[in-house]
Image (tube, helix red, strand yellow):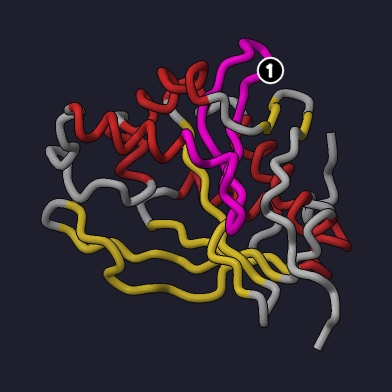
Amino acid sequence: MTDRPAPDFSVKPTLTGERVLLRPFMPDADAPALRAMLQDPEAMRLTGGSHGPDDLPAWDDAAEARFREWYDTRNDERARLDLAVVDRLTDRCVGEVVLNDWNDANRSCGFRTVLGPDGRSRGLGTEATRMIIGYGFEQLGLHRIELEVYDFNPRARHVYEKVGFVAEGVLRDALRWGDEWIDATVMSILAPEWQRHRGHPSGRRA
C-alpha cells in the first residue's frame, strides 16, 4: 500500500490551455450558460440526464433553487473537483468537467463532462478533457480515471480515445431512452499510460 496522501479536491485550480480555461465556478456570471446547458435537450440526452425527447422538466422555481444551491457550493466541495469550462475566445462558460467518486484504496475516480451548445464541435471538449485528466494524474496523484459513454454518443467516445481512454467493456441496456435501451461503454486511463503519451496516444501533438 502507498503512503501517499489522498488528493486534495478542496483546491480548485485555474488551468489555462490554448483555447480553453478551466476555473472555479463564478455562480452569478456562469448561471446563464449553465442554465442553458442543463435545459439543452441534446446535452441531456448524450449524458443520460433525460430519458426521452419530452423528458426535460419545466424550469420552475424549485428547479432554479436546486440549481443555485448546487453551483453555489461547488467551490467548497472537498470530495470532488468541479470546474467550469470557459471558451477563451469569448471568455464565456460553455460547460463543466468533473472528477468525482474518489476511491481511496484504489486511487481511482470517475470523470464526467457536459458542454452546452456553444461549446460543441470546436475541439474545446478534447482540450478540456486532456487538461483535467492531466491535472488528475500529475497534480492529484491518481492511478486510474474512468467514465461511461453511451452508444449514441460516438463523438464523445472519439474524444476520449484521442486523449487515451481505453474501452474495457459494455454495460448492456444501461439507459432507457424513449422506447429504446442504450448500452454504455466503460472506459479508463491509467497513470502509466498517461506518463507515456500525456494525452496524445497517437503521437501527434499540436
In this view, 132 is above or below 164: above
* Residue occupying the point 73% across, 57% down: 8
Query: Is residue 196 found left or right of 123 in the rendered image?
Result: right
Residue holding disc 1:
88
Residue 19 in percent (x, y) is at: 72, 23
**In the structure shown, which secondary structural element does the residue marked by tag 1 occupy?**
loop
Query: Which residue is most to the top?
Result: 90
The residue lying at 88 percent from left, 62 percent from top is 196
For the residue pair 21 and 78, the one nearer the viewer reads as 78
Farthest-out residue, right: 196
Q: Residue furthest bottom?
A: 1
Q: Position of residue 114 (x, y in %)?
A: 47, 40
Query: What range is drawn magenta here?
Result: 72-98
Q: Position of residue 41 (x, y in %)?
A: 27, 33
Q: Quadrant of the C terminus?
A: top right
Residue 91 among magenta residues: yes
In this view, 77 is above or below 43: below
Residue at 57%, 49% (x, y): give it.
77
Quarter holding the N terminus is bottom right
Left or right: residue 55 compared with residue 121? left
- Seen in the picture, residue 158 relative to 105 is either above or below; the reply is above
Kind of residue sitting beneath label 1? Arg
